Amino acid sequence: MSTIRFVDAGRDDPDPALAAGSGAFRDYELDSTFHDELFHEDGTPRARVRRLGAALSRIPLQDLERIQDGVYRRFVHEGITFTVLGVEDVSEQIIPIDCVPRLITAEEWDHLERGLKQRLTALNLFLHDVYHEGKSLRDGVVPTDLVLGCPQYRLEMRELRVPHDVYVAVCGTDIVRVGDSFAVLEDNLRVPSGVSYMLACRTAMKWAFPYLYRAYGVREVAEYPERLYSTLASLALTSGTPRMAVLTPGRYNSAYYEHAFLAGEMGVDLVEGRDLVVHDATLYARTAAGLRRIDVLYRRIDDDFLDPVTFREDSVLGAPGLFHAYRAGNLVLANAPGTGVADDKGLYAYVPRIIRYFLDEEPILANVETHLCREPDGLAYTLEHLHELVVKEVGGSGGYGMLVGPHASAAEREEYAARLREDPTNFISQPVLPLSRAGCFVDGRLQPRHVDLRPFVLQGRDRQHVVPGGLCRVALRKGSLVVNSSQGGGCKDLWILRC
């Protein structure tokens, strides 16, 4: 590990306001273990960030502190929060935002975009297959018991016609950079969240660095709500303009801000289960003007809670008969029930095979090495190397329920090992990845922190769209590899360069 000084290589920066001050990088720590997205190992800046680095190096630290405070205050003013469910209470917290953007070149983004489209195309074909013909199971592409035994596999979806065969209309795939290459960490196909934070970060950063933003020619993300609306509308089964709504579990959900934000931006109703009623296999929303038919429901609640008649009978979050309206062809649900079988962490290991089987193509984006504890060899390897692996529950999310072996105590590892032996099918393990690090302004100075990325892919009736940006999560705690906001992480803006 070494401390470097930034080499001022951006003297052509046309904005004189960015030329004041220097020395912001004097305490920046490089570690050859990790790919640094600002600097090469010798401390020279990478080509894509020369202008950004030069600008930051000229800004006095006290001014950078004011910029950081300004973007945070914008989040406070806009009420951009996430909900933390504690043992005894529920609290709303402002998601931390870092003021230093992360940059990805046009060439890198083209590679990611092609890989994401390929992956979602294959997963939609796989979902149609496992709920209809089941050829991929008979041909041994994926173990039958892994699919049929998955808690997210819905017998109610068997032979059900999904509009335009689009099971997943909105996908958020988690991407990590390890060294000079990108890999998929996991797919989020049920109710992926985070796009509102992407949009909020962009608004804040355009305010913080307007000249730098224009100089880089950053690709825009502001059209996402419009793209989401047109994607969902394209799936409608009715003629004319479809009537749409966003279904939320309510204000205690961790992503409630996002539900309300997207409904407002799309100009559609935000509804809870108590606002809905089904009559003659048709879904309606109760409004002040009377019942209003819903043709497309962008649901942000899990399958189990959609309909107490079909799924969990104790659910008060959905609406009785909702699934009946869906099955009758009078309603589009996005995403379709049962999609969770394809983002189960156990099935993740088979996605490259799924791509080859359905598309006859080699995967563009690699998977992370994964050990399935449901297999004797995978369990044995995981138990033997528990001190150096990350172990996750196959249905887990948000950073909960996982073990980071190198950071756990011997007692914590032994306790986790007992859980593995008791129910091995519920776990997978992966190596601790040396996630790339990006520059962040933390505790009054510029320091590297680990990052990941969640791009959003939209699948409509006949076209796909990858938003040229994404939720860039950052582990703000020094040395931490956990980027989830519920575990102390934050977010930063991602700039996709036009060239």
Image: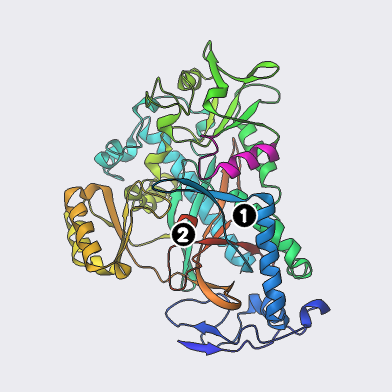
Q: Residue at x 32, y 37 (%)?
A: 151
Colour pattern: rainbow
Percent of width and height locating residue 285: 61, 21
Residue span colored magenta: 248-266
Residue under numbered circle 1: 198
Percent of width and height locating residue 350: 34, 51
Question: Is residue 217 visible to the viewer in this orientation of the structure?
Answer: no
Q: Quadrant of the rendered structure where residue 339 is?
A: top left
The amino acid type of the residue labelled 1 equals Met
Screen quadrant of the C terminus:
bottom right
- Asked if residue 250 lies in the magenta stretch, the reply is yes
Residue count near mark 2 (Cα–Cα under 10 Å), binned few <14, some 14–19, many ≥20: many
Q: Residue at x 26, y 39 (%)?
A: 144
The amino acid type of the residue labelled 2 equals Leu
Answer above or below: position of 452 versus 340: below
Q: Earlier in the sequence, mark 1 or mark 2?
A: 1
Question: Is residue 376 visible to the viewer in this orientation of the structure?
Answer: yes
Residue under numbered circle 2: 365
